[in-house]
Image (tube, grey):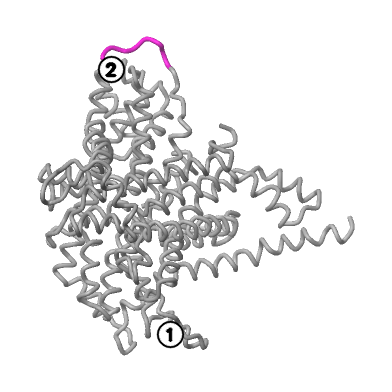
Amino acid sequence: MSIQGAAVVDSARVTPVPSGRKRRRSGEGLAATGFLAPLAIGVLVFIAAPTALSVLMSFYDVSLGGITFVGTANYERMLGDPLFWQSLRVTGVYALLFIPGLTIASLTLALLVQAEFAGVGLWRALLLAPNAVSLVATALVWRFLLADGNGPLAVLGRKVGIDAPSWLGQPGWALLMVVVISIWAFMGFYMLVMIGGRQDIPSELYEAARIDGARPLQQFWFITLPMMRPTIFFVVLMGTVIGLTGLQSFDLVYVMTKGGPANATSVTLFYIYQQAFLYGQFGYAAAMSTVLVLLMLLTAVLFFRATNSGRFDVDN
Amino acid sequence: MSTTEARPRMASGAMTRFARPLVAGLIAVIVVSPLVLMVMQAMRTDAGSWTLANLQFAVADSQVFRWLLNSLVVAVTSTVLVLVVHSMAGYALARLRFRGRELVFLGVASTMFVSLPVILVPLFVIVREMNLLNSFVGIVLPTIFGGFATILMRQFFISVPAELEEAARLDGCGHFQTFVRVFLPISRPAFVSVAVINFLASWNLFMWPLTITSDSRLWVVQVGITSFQTQYQGSWGYMMAVTFLSALPTLVVFFILQRYIVASLKTSGIK
């Protein structure tokens, strides 16, 4: 799940390997080749080759009939495909709600449980528990919770006198629910990341601020927030990657709404999947994947520029 | 000291001691309540009384059992392969000196930017050409080469003192023997971290197995239970029992071994 993706930040902080003797031991290069061979072969076949192939395929018509070079036809088709534009809009709305939602939720939870107090370990574990459950199970549980008529939330609503809407049956609500459930599923892990960032702030800063008479809100605004900037930056970046590629929202959408109602939850990745594996339009799907990746990279670059910060860590 | 100065300090002291644990506990309970409701629904009859029938049916369902077993085979195989492949690569990148090492490291690190959705379609084509559709090999193999585990292992191996290595060298150990006899025995924490993370990730994987398996006998549990949606529409007790069973292994692994996940965050430098 998200845990693996989180290590993206790692490549930005390459730790230097301690340099030992300058002289190379005999056969070290040969040994290294042996140790690295399984990984290298796997990466070439299952990561590098498909990456290259993805761009290549986008210029071909790859369907059951065979392979034909079509130039930029797949890209032109995209321009006139209202469902593609609809899916981009859905992805955009999803990301715009998901990124700040995830960041604020994980930061708030982190500040709540970062200090050590009796029972804090249990509370942290409970907050993290949704992360251990698969997105398929998550989607099924929430389908039950949000079921029309006699689902727990509808029943609860009736008790307090609210007529619950058809959560997954109305376009606006359905997308909002997918966002909320995504945040619920991921905030625990990013809470851990935020706790790490918060605990790195020297407590002397807070003591000094207290002596100067700073109130909790001022402390948050002038110490916590600026000091945690690198961590928050990381979470926003991860949220952007998760939100735009749809790696996670796909599972939720596939199980809960199948892209509906009225394509309201059809994120781009879901539409790509449909085109490829429902209609066999591999070339068109590859072209849309390429555009999606470019959009994601563009957003990341703009984000780096806007925050004037290509670094993840203040002391690096 | 004047009273106006003392008050905020007292207030924040009281906040830390009573209000914060209370609020934190309340929010934690709300956050986890969907999972509690899942378990409760699994143990209820339609009339609302308690029962174990749903869970018994789910356990006795030969299809569910098969899917759980498939998931176990996939997750365990994947985890073993990940440990072997990435510990070797991590060792080479941490302890061996060779030309192009930095370049290889960058290559490994950059694989983490290539997520599955981006390459789903061409990967499917490649796996189809290799005749691996509808096979466990096809489910497992393409998903184990992401660079995260290598980097975690490398970070760990770097911290091993050089003296241990020297001693093995003087005893006449070659590179492979040094790796197996010196590095592997002391690397348990790193191995457990990688194993836990990978087990959870591969047990929960959905999109890839969905894409390449059409034979229901080869479905992993994540793919299998989605097919139950239409079959058992409306019988939420049974659906939640099956869902609970599918989530139980990861919940157990997670609660017993969560400190290793936290530890791996620290090792990898994310914190």
The residue that appears at 34% across and 60% down in the rendered structure is A82
State whether the magenta stretch is mostly helix, strand or loop. loop
Residue type highlighted by circle 1: Val
Question: Circle 1 sits in a helix, a strand or a loop, which is it?
Answer: helix
- Residue of label 2: A29
In this rendering, do the residues under marks 2 and 1 share a single chain? yes
Q: Is residue A25 visible?
A: yes
Q: Label 2, label 1: how many angstroms apart (C-alpha)? A: 67 Å
Report the side of B167 relative to A73 (left or right).
right
Most extreme residue toward the top, as rendered?
A23
In the image, residue A30 sits, relative to residue A311, either above or below, namely: above
Q: Where residue B158 sits: x, y (%)?
A: 41, 28
Amino acid type for the residue under numbered disc 2: Gly
Q: Which residues are magenta?
A: A20-29
Q: Residue at x 60, y 68 (%)?
A: B22
Residue A28 on the magenta span: yes
Which residue of the protein is positioned furthest toward the right in this rendering? B2
Mark 2: few/some/many CA within 10 Å (<14, 14-19, 20+):
some
Report the chain holding disc 1: A
For label 2, the SS is helix
Image point 26% across, 70% down: which residue? Answer: B242
State the image coordinates of residue A57 (x, y, percent, origin top left). 23, 42
Q: Place residue A262 in its image quadrant.
A: bottom left
In percent of width and height, residue A119 lies at 54, 62
Q: The numbered mark 2 sits on a residue in which chain?
A: A
Percent of width and height locating residue A94: 44, 60
Crowdedness near tag 1: few (<14), some (14–19) or many (≥20) residues, C-alpha within 10 Å? some
In this rendering, is residue B28 above or below B141? below
